[in-house]
Amino acid sequence: MISQIVTLVGVLVGALTSYLSVTMAERARHRRTMATRWDQRKLDTYIEYAACVKEVADASKHSRLAEEGSETHKEFIASMEEGERRRSALFEALLLLADPPAIEAAHGVNIALWEMVKLARTHEPPPVAGDLHERLNTYHERAREGLGIRADSRRVR
């Protein structure tokens, strides 16, 4: 009788151990899957935001080169305004998904871009275009850090 109880307890302990190990493995797998999914979403948002910023900057540059009041100028201004609306929505997604350093860098990009947009609306020549590029480079660095991409892993060997 005691040997049967010991056997039964052994079976119960084995079943419980098996259940707990499978449950923990499933939870860990689920967490990894969710982390991968959010990292992919974050990467997509980083890329879309940067591409949109470049589109707005490009439209801004072209609008200043076109004759003020011409149809071409108006098209570039309309394209710039539409891009600015998209950039604003993408920035909201960044606020939800990105890490604070990347958000801060994106805000710096916004400030430089707003200056370019303002100058394009008034058809004034830009001071120096390097400010936006420097801020975009900082944004890219912070985005890579937020995604866990080490700086030395990007170097060509």
Image: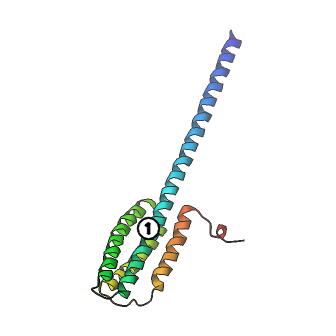
* Residue 149 locus on image (x, y percent): 60, 64
Tell me what residue is drawn at x 48 percent, y 69 percent.
Answer: 101
* Residue 126 locus on image (x, y percent): 39, 89
* Residue 69 locus on image (x, y percent): 27, 86
- Residue 116 found in image quarter: bottom left
Tell me what residue is drawn at x 38 percent, y 87 percent.
Answer: 65
Which amino acid type is shown beneath numbered disc 1? Answer: Tyr
Task: Specify few, some or many for label 1: CA neighbours under 10 Å numbering under 14, 14-19, or 20 or more.
Answer: many
Residue 70 falls left or right of residue 99 = left
Where's the N terminus, which quadrant?
A: top right
Tell me what residue is drawn at x 45 percent, y 62 percent.
Answer: 45
In the displayed orientation, state which residue is furthest to the top: 1
Q: Is residue 14 above or below residue 77?
A: above
- Residue 154 found in image quarter: bottom right
Q: Secondary structure at mark 1?
A: helix
- List the residue tagged with mark 1: 49
In the displayed orientation, state which residue is furthest to the left: 69
Tell me what residue is drawn at x 34 percent, y 86 percent.
Answer: 119
Q: Is residue 77 above or below residue 30?
A: below
Viewer-closest of 71 and 38:
71
* Residue 128 locus on image (x, y percent): 44, 89
Where's the C terminus, which quadrant?
A: bottom right
Viewer-closest of 157 and 77:
77
Residue 102 falls left or right of residue 154 = left
